[in-house]
């Protein structure tokens, strides 16, 4: 099963400011990862290529990192996850026409093999989608001081989280 999953948020800030949110990942001043509601993102060293870690049972290493622009994580777990997920800060719109805007995008691309063919659609995808929307809410809050339309967890996500406890 091939998986391609994208979440993004238009932010009213230049791409370098959105990229600074990426740079804060897994640090004491993390302004992007929703660690209050989800397992924290943590690595064995500061964010840079080769750092190993993850969040909860999802394990990965930093495959590539361009400060204030992009980070890619290559999966090492759970079993059957073969691929990557990444954050990227991208320019959006014409800076001369509407001011500086950017898109903060999270992309997950993987081949789900073995048990992940079942666990991805039933368990991991709903939790992933909820977590990423919470992450983008944090990005919007960091850039604007408010969240126009906060994400809400579905009853299914709430049930999965209760079962996971």
Image (tube, grey):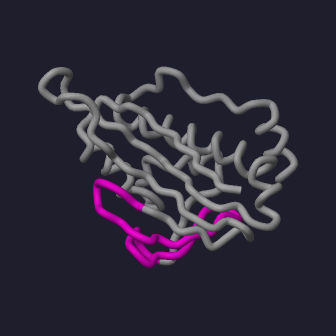
Q: Residue furthest right?
A: 163
Q: Residue at x 39, y 74 (%)?
A: 49
Left or right position of 96 against 155: left
Left or right position of 142 against 33: left
The residue closer to the viewer here, 84 or 58, is 84
Q: Residue at x 52, y 58 (%)?
A: 85
Left or right position of 56 against 158: left
The answer to whether residue 161 is above or below residue 151 is: below
Q: Residue furthest left?
A: 96
The answer to whether residue 118 is above or below residue 145 is: below
The answer to whether residue 29 is above or below residue 65 is: above
Where is residue 160 shown, x and y percent of the image? 82, 44
Magenta segment: 45-71
The residue closer to the viewer here, 114 or 40, is 114
The answer to whether residue 36 is above or below residue 111 is: above
Where is residue 155 shown, x and y percent of the image? 80, 31
Q: Residue at x 53, y 69 (%)?
A: 74
Where is residue 34 shown, x and y percent of the image? 56, 46
Where is residue 116 shown, x and y percent of the image? 77, 61
Q: Residue at x 47, y 21 (%)?
A: 148
Q: Specify the quadrant that holds the N terminus.
A: bottom right
């Amino acid at each position: 099963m091939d998986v391609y999953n994208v979440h993004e948020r238009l932010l009213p800030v230049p791409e370098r400011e959105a990229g600074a949110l990426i740079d804060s990942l897994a640090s004491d001043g993390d302004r992007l990862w929703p660690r209050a509601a989800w397992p924290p993102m943590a690595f064995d060293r500061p964010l840079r290529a080769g750092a190993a870690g993850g969040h909860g049972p999802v394990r990965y290493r930093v495959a590539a990192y361009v400060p204030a622009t992009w980070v890619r994580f290559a999966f090492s777990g759970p079993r059957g996850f073969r691929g990557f997920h990444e954050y990227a800060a991208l320019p959006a719109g014409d800076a001369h026409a509407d001011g500086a805007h950017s898109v903060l995008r999270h992309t997950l691309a993987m081949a789900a093999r073995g048990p992940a063919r079942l666990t991805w659609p039933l368990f991991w995808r709903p939790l992933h989608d909820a977590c990423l929307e919470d992450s983008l809410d944090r990005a919007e809050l960091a850039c604007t001081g408010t969240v126009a339309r906060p994400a809400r967890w579905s009853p299914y996500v709430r049930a999965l989280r209760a079962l996971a406890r």
